[in-house]
Image: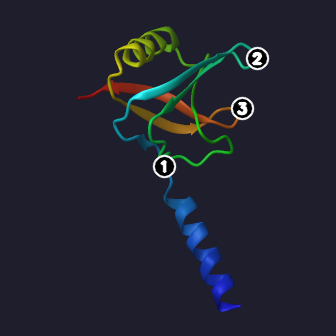
Amino acid sequence: MRKLILIGLLVLSGACQAEAAWTESKIITELLINPNYGSIFIKQSTMINPVPCQGVGYYELDSSNTMNKEIYSFLLSSYMAKRPVKIYVSSCTTSGYSRIDQVLGTE
């Protein structure tokens, strides 16, 4: 019983610590345009997501972002050049993936 309580507390404390943050600086390995969602999904070489969402394995740039075209252009050029980027995620989208709010090119 004690082990169950301890595991429950550890899971709860991990969920409470999740907050908006930058991902690690990694290259983009996959870029997916999904017209069903009206969104662009990307995958980095290592996915360590600071915001736990239901959808895993991708970050989502949804159409509600006012800088959608500019961010997409930046992500596409970084993907093509194989340049690492950091992605700022703050919340989950309606489709359940971590929302891309900002991007930062790095070396």
**Looking at this rendering, what residue extends furthest in the left direction?**
107
Which quadrant: the N terminus? bottom right
Instruction: Name the side, left or right, on which 75 lies relative to 54.
Output: left
Q: Nearer the viewer, mark 2 or mark 3?
A: 2
Whole-percent x, y for residue 55 in the image = 67, 40
Q: Quadrant of residue 24?
A: top left
Q: 38 above or below 18?
A: above
Q: 82 above or below 95?
A: above
User: What residue would you read off at disc 1?
Assistant: 19
- Where disc 3 sits, the SS reads loop
Q: Are the residues at dot 1 and dot 2 in contact (C-beta closer than 8 Å)?
A: no
Residue 95's disc number: 3
First of labels 1, 3 by sequence position: 1
Q: How is the image coloured?
A: rainbow
Q: Residue at x 71, y 32 (%)?
A: 95
First of labels 2, 3 by sequence position: 2
Q: Residue at x 44, y 27 (%)?
A: 28
Most foreground residue, 72 or 26: 26
Q: 54 above or below 14?
A: above
For the residue marked with disc 1, what is the amino acid? Glu
First of labels 1, 2 by sequence position: 1
- Where disc 2 sits, the SS reads loop
**Alpha carbon of mark 1 to alpha carbon of mark 3: how far?**
19 Å
Which quadrant: the C terminus? top left
Instruction: Name the side, left or right, on which 24 lies relative to 61.
Output: left
Whole-percent x, y for residue 49 in the image = 50, 45
